[in-house]
Image: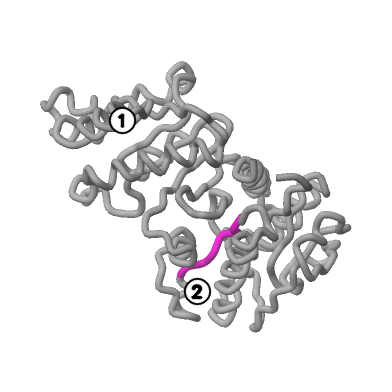
Amino acid sequence: MSGPLPPVALSCGEPAGIGPEIAARARAALGPALPFFWIGDPRHLPPGTEITEITSPQEALSAQGLPVLVHEIPGALTLGTPNPDHAEGVISAIARGVELVQSGAASALCTAPIHKKALQDGAGFAYPGHTEYLAALCGVKQVVMMLASDQLRVVPATIHIPLKDVPATLTAAGLRETLQITHAGLIRDFGIEAPRIVVAGLNPHAGEGGKMGLEETQMIGPVVDELRREGMDVRGPMSADTMFHAAARAGYDAAVCMYHDQALIPIKTLDFDRGVNVTLGLPIVRTSPDHGTALDIAGQARANPTSLIEALRMAARMGAARRA
């Protein structure tokens, strides 16, 4: 497709958190070189923020200051204290961003962190988080969470569940689908023609031939073998403690791990400030900074915008890859 890439949409997230201030700081850092616009209530931005109110995403391409697609959110604002009265507005800002990407007016959606309890208390929000809500809006049953940076891409096959529940939650069908979505996402969203994926074992030493667990020989290994026979470049199960040193990382494009911390500890150790949360499997591009609302420092000019800046950059690159 020809013509300039449409701008990235950035939903406001929790108004009482650091979302508004890091949006302003991201614009100050990036300038017009990476066009994006903020969907939210201008009253929630830090005092003195230079903004341009826009009526369509296209206007963000030539705006001075932070382009703001005004989305009124009723209710008083106290920084550091979520107001359930904001819930409906925060939720509808996300939905508005999805609609703009679906229509082609925006190239991708970047979401600022939300406060789930405030959304539940104020609007009966029925989803565990952004990812599940976006899947519902897009009519998708299965999506994959990836944490990505320039140094590493990781995918947890199970996410926010107790460690004791991981073995029972892991299934051959679920792992197969996770690997397929990851493979397709690396091609479509990251422009990698022939992705290389490694898969971690669940147990120490990847089960050590059954001495430390049977999940590797009975479930993980057969899924990997089956997908390899179908043409996917996938290896494993591998011992997780040997997968993340520099030489190992050079041999693959993404690592699929069996549980949350097995995936997130390596990337947060290697690149804490630049990790980006990516949702694979959606018909739209979605990224998010890999941190929460940080209510305790909201309004104190201490918030680090680096992860949001990286999330906006990654959203723009992924949007361009899909367009190509």
Q: Quadrant of residue 74 in the image?
A: bottom right
Give the quarter of the figure containing the C terminus. Answer: top right
Crowd rating for badge 1 (residues with CA inside 10 Å; few <14, some 14–19, many 20+): few
- Residue at the disc numbered 2: 118
Query: How far across and how far down the image is residue 280, in percent?
Result: 47, 48
Which residue lies at the image location 59% right of the left edge and 61% below the top edge?
102
Q: Callout 2, which amino acid?
A: Ala
Please state which of the two labelled residues, at mark 1 or mark 2, is closer to the viewer.
1
Residue at 59%, 72% (x, y): give it. 90
- In percent of width and height, residue 168 lies at 18, 49
Q: Label for residue 230?
A: 1
SS class, disc 1: loop
| Screen quadrant of the N terminus | top right
Q: Residue at x 55, y 77 (%)?
A: 87
The front one of 60 and 17 is 60
Numbered disc 2: secondary structure:
helix
193 or 21: which is nearer to us? 193
Say which of 155 and 322 sits in front: 322
Going from N to C along the chain, the mark reached first, 1 or 2, is 2
Query: Whole-percent x and y of residue 261?
Result: 37, 42
